[in-house]
Each structure stands twice: as structure tokens, then as C-alpha cells.
Amino acid sequence: MTGTVTDTYAAALQHDIADVPDDARLFGVVRRPTGWFSALVDENVPALGPPESLLSETKDRQEALQMQGLCDEEAHNAAWVETDFGTRYCEHVANDDAAREAVDALAERVANGETVALVCFEGESKRCHRRILDDVIRERAGIGGE
């Protein structure tokens, strides 16, 4: 029996509006979890957070775009595109040993019937690495998308 993969964000869990199955095991996928974030998830997997250099570059670009008048969400999404965040995150997951091992471990759990929910900070309106990771884990587990 194959499990499932889903994703959500911290605020949705905090406000009890997350759309995740009751049996889901919550895996944080952030590089530097706060104490309150760690309390929300069953386990955090820092290796699946974006690399510090990519986070820093994207944040710097986002701040510059906000200074030019873009709102937080627009600046975040534009910075994501300008820094080629998605492609670079995929490269990280494919080439970093710890990230590959973490993806394989989660994919194995899903293949063995577990429901895995990926959790990070970004809300639904912002582009986020957890959605890329969702697809990668599904592929490795041999299941299709939703």
C-alpha cells in the first residue's frame, strides 16, 4: 500500500486550517527552524531546506524589490524568479548527499504506506520549495501527483 505526500505551512497549522490528513506525519523542511516551528512538526529535516546562500540571495533581492514598492508577496515571488530559485533548489536536492538521502528516506516512507506532510513557513500565495519537494518525493516513491 502506497502512502501520500502533501504540504502545508506553519501558520495554517497554528490556526488549525491546514488541509492535511489526520494520519499525516509532519516533516518540517526548513534550514533553521525556530522553537515554535519545531513544536508544530513531528520532525524537521534541515537538509531539505534551501541552501543558506540561496536563501540569503533571494531574501536580499526580495528586500530590494520591496524598497522599490512591491508588496511582500509580489517581491517574494519576483525574487524567486530573478534568482532562479526553483532550478537551483532542484540542483541542491539532486546534488547534495544529505538532501538526496533525506528525499530517499521520505520517499521510502511514502512507498511503505505512510502519509507525509511537508511543512515550511511560506503561505499559499508565495512560491515555495516544499511544492518542488512534494513532486520529487512523489516521483521517487513511484506515485503520481494529486
Image (cartoon, rainbow, N blue to C red):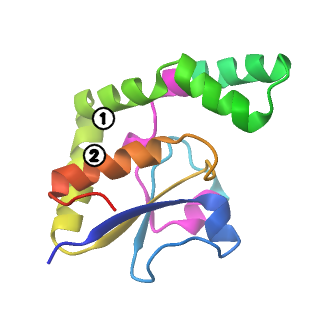
Of the numbered discs 1 and 2, the one sitting upstream in the chain is: 1
Query: Magenta part of the protein: which range?
Result: 37-55
Q: Residue at x 38, y 43 (%)?
A: 132
Query: Residue 136 shows which numbered tag?
Result: 2
The one nearer the camera, 52 or 14, is 14
> Residue 90: x percent and y percent?
33, 31
Cα distance, mark 1 to mark 2?
9 Å
Q: Is residue 52 magenta?
A: yes
Q: Secondary structure at mark 1?
A: helix
| Amino acid carrying mark 2 in the image | Val
Q: Residues within 10 Å of mark 2 (few under 14, many from 20)?
A: some
Q: Quadrant of the C terminus?
A: bottom left
Q: Residue at x 24, y 32 (%)?
A: 94
The image quadrant that residue 21 belongs to is bottom left
Position of 69 relative to 115 (above/below): above
Q: Secondary structure at mark 2?
A: helix
| Badge 1 vs badge 2, beta-carbon distance below 8 Å | yes
Position of 116 relative to 64 (above/below): below
Q: Is residue 113 left or right of residue 81?
A: left
Q: Residues within 10 Å of mark 1 (few under 14, many from 20)?
A: many
> Residue 35: x percent and y percent?
64, 57
Position of 46 relative to 68 (above/below): below
Query: Residue 102 shows which numbered tag?
Result: none
Residue that mark 1 sits on: 93
Q: Quadrant of the N terminus?
A: bottom left
The one nearer the camera, 128 or 108, is 128
